[in-house]
Amino acid sequence: MKKVSQLICSIALGAMVALPSIAQPLVQPNSPDYNPKASYDGPYKLNSWSISAHFGPSMFFGDLREYDFWPVTKTSLDRHKESGTIQGGISINKQLSYLFGARLDGSLGNLRGMKSRNYGRYFEGNYGDVSLSGTVNLKGLLMGPNKMKRWKVDVYAGIGHVFYDATAYSLTGGVPLRETGKKSDWMIPTGLNVAYELTPRLDLGLDFRLNHTNSDYIDATYGGDYDITPNLTLIENQKTSRKGNSELDKYGYGSIQLTYKLGKKPLKVKKVDGKWDYRPEDGYYNLRHTDPKVLLKAPKILTLEEMDSVAKANRPKDIDPRLLLDTDGDGVSDFFDKEPNSPAGSIVDGSGRVLDFDTYVKNALATGAACSEIFANVQFETDKNVITPEFQDILKNVAQLMNKNGCRLQLAGHADRRATDRYNMALSRRRVEAVKNFLINEAGLSDPSKVIVDYFGAFKPIADSATRDGLKKNRRVELKLLP
């Protein structure tokens, strides 16, 4: 008995210490009832509170007990009945995870015992106790959540306080020998609880408990105290230590227990076609009997036919093919292009209509309009970087607009393919520097930092270099006005 109770105590107390690190919630908000602060794993909320009532025989273990296991059941000349004592109480239970929980207990009862050898006494007393214990789901720990599904087997241990009063009597004549008066001491409860799930609300079970007290006085007798006065009167002025020459007292009980599971919309899992059918969307299972992990449904693996069906059902409508075409290459799709056949390299607005760069610059100067993003090209003769008169007026207007409205200008130099890459890169650089220098020195640009320069040789043609006209278009410096 002592070794078993010590084992239960070690398991349950170890569970209470380990619980904070073990019972951490998974962040899987797959349900509107997901509780991120729950101490258990899983995406669904579960009921976890219950209240129990128990009632059954009590039993004392200490100095005034005749036998180790079986109580004396009849009173005779040298015996006094030890059986027939009862106790009852309630428990408030909180399941913290599927494997671990806690219970707050309170009970009232009476005790009785006798010892003919050495003592020649019997005692009778009453007690009340309160305790807080940690529980371990032994069935779930050893067998998993789906075997013996309706059963719950817990071991538990904790700490509590016992309040008692008792009187010891002589076996012959029943004369009072000693009274404890109202006393109290702490104790350690250990136990085993077996329950069966009857309905979504009710469990029926048995509760077996052994309370280890810090007292040797619950039977109003100290170990080794055999002293009885000749006239059998009340013994006075005796030693009042908690322990005599024997072990500390213990008491326990075996009870029938009825548990009412609290919470809204309780569910009890059912078996369908040989398998447990969980439906968490219909209500709330109780954590006493349901491991939250079993509520996680395995992802469905689709067949090729099912995947094809899903793909077809979610396929977007076909788009107008004109959105993907830009026949004239001006950057505006044919669906929106008002002038779908504008010449290559033309400057166009958002609807594809051709814009004249020089006209735009002159209008912006006249009206004081803000700068917009617009393009133009300055063309060059073969192997030259000299700006011809037809482009000089354009550059002068650009410089005036930049001075007036604060526009920026991006320059990109290019060449045709009729030279080595190295030579073309140098030529395109000379061309773009020529345009920048003209803007500063001839056109009167006041802030050269507003000019951005780059050059690409023959790597970015805009026309076919196999024709004379194509070669001419590729010998250019691109102008890009920016706000």
Image (cartoon, rainbow, N blue to C red):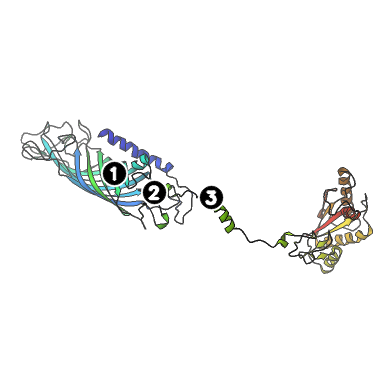
Q: Are marks 2 and 3 in contact (CB under 8 Å)?
A: no
In the image, which disc is placed on residue 65? none
For mark 3, give the secondary structure. Answer: loop
Q: Amino acid at mark 3?
A: Thr
Residue 184, above or below 33:
above
Kindly give the residue lying farthest to the front in the view shown.
305
* Distance (Cα) linking label 2 and label 1: 27 Å
**Crowd class of label 2 (few under 14; some 14 to 19; many from 20; radius 10 Å):** few
- The x, y position of residue 212, in whole percent, is 25, 38
For mark 1, give the secondary structure. Answer: strand
Q: Are marks 2 and 1 in contact (CB under 8 Å)?
A: no
Q: Are marks 1 and 3 in contact (CB under 8 Å)?
A: no
Disc nearest the viewer among 2 and 1: 2
Is residue 39 visible in the rendered structure shown here?
Answer: no
- The x, y position of residue 314, in whole percent, is 58, 58
Q: Amino acid at mark 1?
A: Asn
Mark 2 / mark 3, whichever is N-terminal: 2
| Image side of residue 472 versus residue 228, left or right | right
Q: Which residue is mark 2?
A: 275
Quadrant where the C terminus is found in the figure: bottom right
**Crowd class of label 3 (few under 14; some 14 to 19; many from 20; radius 10 Å):** few
In the image, which disc is placed on residue 193? 1
- The x, y position of residue 386, in whole percent, is 93, 53
Q: Which residue is mark 3?
A: 303
| Image side of residue 467 versus residue 259, left or right | right
Which residue is located at x 42 percent, y 56 percent?
Answer: 281
Mark 1 / mark 3, whichever is N-terminal: 1
